[in-house]
Image (spheres, helix red, strand yellow):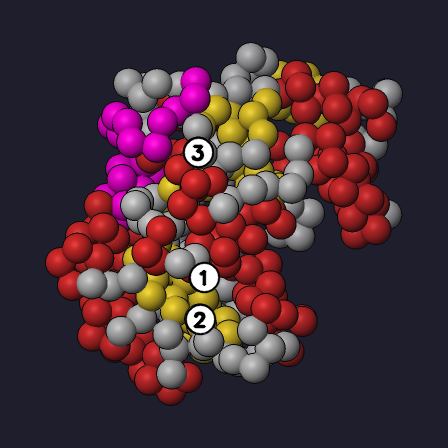
Amino acid sequence: MKNVLVIGSTGQIGSELTMNLRRHLPTGAVVAGYVSGAEPKGVLAESGPSEIADVRDAACLGAIVDKYKIDTIYNLAALLSAVAEKKPLLAWDIQINGLLAVLEVAREKGCAVFTPSSIGSFGPSTPHVGTPQDTIQRPRSMYGVTKVATELLSDYYFHKYGVDTRSVRFPGLISYVQLPGGGTTDYAVEIYYAAVKGEEFVCPIAAGTFMDMMYMPDALKGAIDLMEADPSRLVHRNSFNIASMSFDPEMILAEIRKRYPDFRMRYEVDPVRQAIANSWPDSMDDSCAREEWDWKPSYDLSSMTDDMIINLKAKLL
Ligand code: SER
């Protein structure tokens, strides 16, 4: 990996992954791809090149690949689960027609491609505890449908054309840098903002609903390590389960109350998000990622909570 295009560089994952890649590849070009209305700002804009890169515009993507001699594309353009339920056709257009444009450019120009999948690729009939790497994937949300199709198309381009596609199934991602927009796991980010600001938190997910979650530094490391992994060790490609912690709203509340004993939370369950959450795994088995490319997370709920609070205090207070 030398020169990289990040599509969706100003989004929840892209804004941090682009900066990590720039530190990781100091002599290469890491191009921040964006769409109009979501231009890179501040250090993201100043620390390297940026280009308009609509994921559905193969000609535009191809021109960027040529201009910067791109060898790896991180395709992070996506609508999250709750938004995708409101705009299913747009979600399909971005997630699948966009992916096809990226894969075609990659096939023609010899790029490797990372397009994340998610816990959202599983559904009600999936075993929910210790969800295996290879198991039933029959999601009922449009987000999930696009993620299963993403995995299949990415594998298809690998087997049929030899495109070096690799990816992970991300858990809910937690970070103090950029708020997610319209996901089912967003509550686990927003709860920290409320705690640090001294506000009551209204939780849209019911007590007892367990989901896999991950602190962003682990997610970024996974995305980079997988693209640099020895391909001869990869039995799987699209996509690897990766996990680090699983909790329900009561567990994260208890962890925050160890630091903020007066923190208050009440429930106002959102039926759309709750139905999606009920259909997702409680905890994934990530042993294939551990065996095939040495995946190993660093953060658990307690160390993530410490780090989130330190950084949010610096950001918000
Ligand atoms: N965090 C995503 C969502 O909640 C799942 O991948 O939509």
The image quarter in which residue 247 lies: top right
Q: Position of residue 188 (x, y in %)?
A: 62, 32
Ligand 1 lies under 8 Å from the Cβ of mark 1:
no
Q: Position of residue 202 (x, y in %)?
A: 65, 24
Residue 11's disc number:
none
SS state under label 1: helix
The image quarter in which residue 194 lies: top right
SS state under label 2: loop
Q: Is residue 35 above or below residue 221?
A: below
Residue at image location 27% in from the left, 73% down from the top: 110
Label 3 sits on residue:
287
- 10 Å crowding of disc 3: few (<14), some (14-19), many (20+): some
Label 1 sits on residue:
228
The amino acid pointed to by label 3 is Ser
Q: Is residue 122 magenta?
A: no
- 10 Å crowding of disc 1: few (<14), some (14-19), many (20+): few
Q: Earlier in the sequence, mark 1 or mark 2?
A: 2
Is disc 1 in contact with disc 2, using a CB cutoff of under 8 Å?
yes
Ligand 1 lies under 8 Å from the Cβ of mark 2:
no
The amino acid pointed to by label 2 is Met
Residue at image location 67% in from the left, 71% down from the top: 42
Q: Earlier in the sequence, mark 2 or mark 3?
A: 2
Per the rendered image, the range of residues in magenta is: 129-151
The answer to whether residue 79 shows anywhere in this view is no
Q: Mark 2 or mark 3, which is nearer to you?
A: 3
Q: Position of residue 189 (x, y in %)?
A: 63, 37
Q: Which residue is outermost to the bottom?
A: 67
Left/right placement of residue 91 relative to residue 215 reads left
The answer to whether residue 42 shows anywhere in this view is yes
The amino acid pointed to by label 1 is Glu
Q: Is residue 58 above or below residue 248?
A: below
Label 2 sits on residue:
1
